[in-house]
């Protein structure tokens, strides 16, 4: 692969996808409220939300650290130099995305935004079709049989 094309051709960077959906869900909650008003969690919702956010942050940080230890860049617009298959990557091919989902879910609970929770469905569809599928195509071209064996051994999600 040439350096110009040596990266996953994803449609959107995942953090922007999640942040955009969270912002849209918050705006919809303000303009067309469903259930309680925005940012009015009770103690249980706040605690549950913080637990999800914390677990998501820890998982994403642990997974990102594995990229650092392998000496390969994490941004989707840069070429990867190593296939990471240790740490959380031995259980799921997408621990960072699972971490982002947990963070998003927790923030939706904290914000008491039913709209944000509902928007998680299209976020996951976009993530799967326009990010993960393209990353997997890139990784298969880049690492060939090693990546195909990894895909057979480790599930995409859990």
Image (spheres, rainbow, N blue to C red):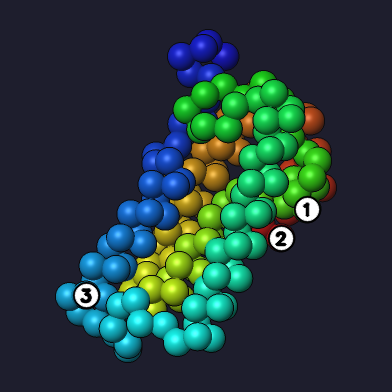
Give the side of residue 102 with respect to residue 72, left or right.
left
Looking at the rendering, in which quadrant would you find the C terminus?
bottom right
Alpha-carbon span between mark 1 and mark 2: 7 Å
Quick check: marks 3 and 1 in contact, CB under 8 Å? no
**Which of the 4 image quadrants contains residue 133?**
top right
* Residue 91 in picture, x, y percent from top left: 78, 53
Give the side of residue 44 with respect to residue 21, left or right.
right
Q: Is residue 117 visible?
A: no
Alpha-carbon span between mark 3 and mark 1: 39 Å
Looking at the rendering, in which quadrant would you find the N terminus?
top right
**Around disc 1, counting alpha carbons within 10 Å, would you say few (fewer than 14), some (14 to 19), or many (20 or more)?**
some
Residue shown at 42% from the left, 55% from the top:
18
Quick check: marks 3 and 2 in contact, CB under 8 Å? no
Up/down of 15 relative to 27, above or below? above
Q: Earlier in the sequence, mark 3 or mark 2?
A: 3
* Residue 103 in picture, x, y percent from top left: 52, 61
* Residue 75 in picture, x, y percent from top left: 52, 32
Q: Considering the numbered disc 2 on the image, is that residue within a helix, a strand or a loop?
A: loop
Residue 30's disc number: 3
Q: Is residue 14 visible?
A: yes
**Around disc 2, counting alpha carbons within 10 Å, would you say few (fewer than 14), some (14 to 19), or many (20 or more)?**
few
Residue shown at 28% from the left, 83% from the top:
37
Residue shown at 17% from the left, 75% from the top:
31
Up/down of 146 relative to 11, above or below? above
Quick check: marks 1 and 2 in contact, CB under 8 Å? yes
Q: Considering the numbered disc 3 on the image, is that residue within a helix, a strand or a loop?
A: helix
Residue that carries the numbered disc 2 in the rendered image:
158
Residue that carries the numbered disc 1 in the rendered image:
91
Quick one: 126 or 56, which is closer to the camera?
A: 56
Q: Considering the numbered disc 1 on the image, is that residue within a helix, a strand or a loop?
A: loop
Q: Earlier in the sequence, mark 3 or mark 1?
A: 3
């Amino acid at each position: 692969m040439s350096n110009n094309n040596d990266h996953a051709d994803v449609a959107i960077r995942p953090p922007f996808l999640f942040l955009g959906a969270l912002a849209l869900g918050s705006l919809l909650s303000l303009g067309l409220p469903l259930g309680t008003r925005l940012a009015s969690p009770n103690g249980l919702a706040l605690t549950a939300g913080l637990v999800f956010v914390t677990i998501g942050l820890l998982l994403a940080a642990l997974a990102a650290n594995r990229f650092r230890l392998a000496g390969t860049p994490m941004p989707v617009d840069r070429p990867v130099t190593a296939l990471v298959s240790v740490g959380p990557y031995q259980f799921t091919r997408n621990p960072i995305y699972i971490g982002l989902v947990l963070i998003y879910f927790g923030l939706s609970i904290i914000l008491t935004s039913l709209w944000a929770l509902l928007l998680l469905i299209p976020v996951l569809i976009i993530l799967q079709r326009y990010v993960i599928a393209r990353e997997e195509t890139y990784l298969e071209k880049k690492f060939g049989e090693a990546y195909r064996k990894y895909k057979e051994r480790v599930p995409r999600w859990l």
